[in-house]
Image: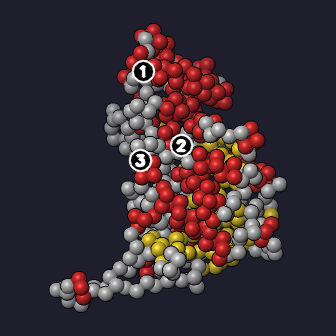
């Protein structure tokens, strides 16, 4: 069965005459979205064929009077033949942005279908295909991919102001209500429950860990934080906030290592070099940044020499930046002499600009020239041709329609949800957290994630519930074939440990 859903854009019926007054207009009655479409599928994972039911469509959020507030688009996969759902985990998953739909995790690593790339992670030629995902998590858990309001096909209900969903608190409340409602309608309260988020989706997941507990008494077994950012102070290059310069440095080192721009003594072994970069960043470099204008000329000279060795940037350039290199400058400067720019999401990827003398790149080659086309094209094809679901709205893969995002809950400060996660772990000592980090990711650097968890105040017994894994890839580490394979192994280990 195919379903056409244009009801979302219904607002007011136009009068039959051009001179009609607003008072003569009548609101279009709300039309409930049709039931989700169900299709059958199979995926082969580690040599075993798994049959599943895919459920594609909307879940309508309503207030307690029954008034529709939003229509949330989702795609869910449930393994067939499971007689006892209390033994079968369910994972609610989403990407970030804010403004990103869930297609990246869905078609990149977790769902039963994936987009083939080169082993490095580069795009193949269009049009793009989908293949069986032998690295899907569906053998371990049922999956629900959620697109928050104004991403994917999700929209506010007719007559509702979309701003009520566009902000940190607003988003936590609406996604949290979706999870509660799906859990209720599909009988999953007795199932082990997990969250999996990427990028801002990790911010959302940490926020939900507390919200679901406190609002609904819905406790989570485990949270996967893929390319994690919980404390925004670690990633905001504001004047007066020197923290990101130190926390990004090891990622600069990794990218410079990949492009063979490091000093010879650091080019031999990546992991040893990154450990040296961590120690320099947390020690001598942080001390120098703390001194600010009190840094002596001798101290500055010694620091610039080491910075140059760890970043591949010239000493002259580092002095010009006052020892503080922002992301945009690094990706432009590192390969400037070759007429190339490095990627922000994945520093292994390179692009070319019209102007090699610019202060920043024209586009992110690891987004616009790598994943945007394949993922968006494949998703639009997949939902209609394989999942048999039709929707004429544009599928918003990564959009600015969620802006401005409301951070009023943290006025005059940085959003930091690590404390929410700490409290959730204290209230639920069985909650396990897994952090996956890419070495070449400049959106959510691995050292910043480490810093955040090292400053959460976790007790020794709580720290045992947190695990980190690392990948020689970027923000979407799964586009790199070896990292995708390792990610699946690490996911299996995480679920096995969380369910002991």
* Rendering coords of residue 246 (x, y %): 52, 29
Classify mark 3: helix, strand or loop: loop
Which sits earlier in the primary sequence, circle 2 or circle 3?
2
Q: Which residue is mark 1?
A: 292
CA gap between label 1 and label 3 equals 26 Å
At x 66%, y 74%, the residue is 184
Q: Residues within 10 Å of mark 1 (few under 14, many from 20)?
A: few
Q: Which of the 4 image quarters holds residue 217?
A: bottom right
Mark carried by residue 411: 3
Which of the pair 309/15 is nearer the observer?
15
Which of the pair 215/67 is nearer the observer?
215
* Rendering coords of residue 350 (x, y %): 48, 41
Q: Is residue 330 among the parts visible in the rendering?
A: yes
Q: Is residue 294 above or below residue 437?
A: above
CA gap between label 2 and label 1 equals 23 Å
At x 60%, y 27%, the residue is 278
* Rendering coords of residue 469 (x, y %): 69, 42
Could you tell whether 400 is left or right of 110 in the image?
left
> Tags 2 and 1 in contact by the CB under 8 Å rule?
no
At x 45%, y 57%, the residue is 167
* Rendering coords of residue 406 (x, y %): 42, 55
Could you tell whether 146 is left or right of 497 in the image?
left
Give the quadrant of the C terminus.
Answer: bottom right
> Tags 1 and 3 in contact by the CB under 8 Å rule?
no
At x 39%, y 25%, the residue is 321
């Amino acid at each position: 069965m195919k379903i056409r859903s244009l009801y979302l854009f219904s607002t007011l019926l136009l009068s039959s005459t051009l001179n009609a007054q607003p008072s003569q207009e009548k609101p279009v009655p709300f039309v409930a979205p049709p039931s989700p479409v169900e299709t059958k599928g199979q995926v082969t994972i580690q040599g075993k064929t798994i049959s599943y039911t895919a459920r594609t469509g909307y879940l309508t959020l309503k207030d307690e009077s029954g008034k529709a507030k939003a229509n949330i688009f989702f795609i869910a996969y449930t393994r067939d033949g499971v007689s006892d759902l209390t033994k079968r985990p369910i994972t609610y998953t989403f990407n970030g942005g804010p403004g990103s739909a869930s297609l990246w995790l869905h078609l990149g690593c977790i769902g039963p279908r994936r987009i083939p790339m080169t082993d490095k992670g580069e795009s193949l030629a269009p049009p793009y295909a989908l293949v069986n995902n032998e690295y899907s998590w569906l053998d371990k858990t049922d999956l629900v991919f959620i697109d928050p309001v104004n991403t994917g096909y999700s929209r506010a209900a007719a007559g509702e102001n979309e701003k009520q969903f566009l902000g940190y608190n607003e988003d936590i409340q609406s996604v949290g209500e979706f999870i509660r409602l799906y859990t209720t309608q599909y009988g999953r309260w007795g199932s082990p429950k997990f969250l999996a988020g990427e990028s801002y989706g990790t911010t959302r997941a940490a926020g939900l860990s507390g919200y679901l507990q406190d609002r609904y008494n819905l406790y989570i077994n485990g949270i996967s934080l893929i390319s994690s950012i919980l404390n925004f102070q670690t990633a905001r290059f504001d004047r007066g906030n020197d923290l990101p310069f130190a926390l990004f440095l090891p990622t600069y080192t990794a990218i410079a290592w990949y492009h063979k721009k490091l000093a010879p003594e650091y080019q031999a072994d990546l992991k040893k070099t990154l450990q040296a970069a961590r120690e320099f960043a947390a020690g001598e470099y942080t001390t120098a940044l703390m001194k600010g204008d009190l840094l002596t000329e001798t101290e500055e000279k010694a620091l610039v020499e080491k910075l140059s060795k760890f970043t591949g940037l010239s000493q002259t350039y580092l002095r010009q930046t006052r020892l503080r290199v922002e992301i945009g400058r690094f990706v432009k400067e590192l390969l400037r002499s070759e007429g190339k720019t490095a990627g922000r999401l994945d520093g292994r990827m390179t692009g070319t600009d019209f102007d090699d003398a610019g202060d920043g790149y024209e586009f992110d080659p690891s987004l616009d020239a790598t994943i945007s086309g394949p993922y968006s094209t494949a998703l639009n094809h997949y939902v209609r041709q394989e999942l048999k679901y039709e929707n004429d709205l544009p599928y918003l893969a990564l959009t600015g329609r969620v802006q401005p995002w409301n951070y009023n809950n943290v006025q005059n400060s940085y959003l930091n949800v690590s404390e929410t996660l700490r409290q959730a772990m204290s209230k639920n000592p069985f909650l396990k957290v897994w952090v996956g980090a890419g070495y070449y990711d400049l959106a959510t650097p691995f050292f910043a994630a480490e810093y955040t968890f090292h400053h959460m105040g976790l007790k020794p017994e709580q720290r045992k519930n947190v695990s980190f894994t690392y990948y020689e890839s970027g923000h979407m580490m799964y586009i790199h074939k070896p990292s995708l394979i390792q990610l699946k192994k690490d996911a299996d280990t995480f679920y096995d440990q969380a369910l002991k």
